[in-house]
Amino acid sequence: MPDETPDFWKKLQILLAPVGGLLTAISVAVIGSWGAYILNKKQETDTRAKVFAELMSQREQAETVMRKDMFAQIIDAVLKPEKSSPDLAVLNMELLAYNFHESLNLKPLFAYVRRHLPTGGETLANPP
């Protein structure tokens, strides 16, 4: 009887050896696939973040260019009163105040426009 037990284990080992190799191969494949999936997800997330950052940068650049052009046109209209009416000068000053109050001290510009506005009996609007 004692000889049968080692023989049983040897037979079991022979039967299970291919299954062990197969399980090893399957586990390596599953772990490899899972790792590739995780890496792809990370790359996709990084790509999305990069695209978002580029879009935000382009948006900020476009807004800066628009604000620069707007500022230049309004200042030009305010400082060259022969081109515009007093009403338009006041409107331009309001546009400056609403859009650039955080970055500019507009008090000197308002004083300049006030000095150049018609006084007393003069009307602000151009007659038709």
Image (cartoon, rainbow, N blue to C red):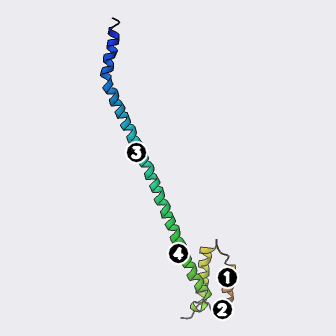
Residue placed at 67% from the left, 82% from the top?
110
Q: Quadrant of residue 8?
A: top left
Q: Nearer the viewer, mark 2 or mark 3?
A: 3
Please give the residue where the numbered disc 2 appears in the rendered image: 118
What x and y, as percent, mark residue 73?
56, 82
Q: Is residue 112 left or right of residue 28?
A: right
Please give the residue where the numbered disc 4 appears in the rendered image: 66
Q: Nearer the viewer, mark 4 or mark 1?
A: 4
- Of the residues shown, which amino acid type is indicated by label 3? Tyr
- Of the residues shown, which amino acid type is indicated by label 1? Phe
What x and y, as percent, mark residue 26?
34, 34
Which tag, 2 or 3, sits closer to the chain's start? 3
- How far, Cα to Cα, is label 2 from label 4? 32 Å
Q: Nearer the viewer, mark 1 or mark 2?
A: 1
Q: Give the number of the disc on residue 37.
A: 3
Q: Quadrant of residue 12?
A: top left
- How far, Cα to Cα, is label 4 from label 1? 23 Å
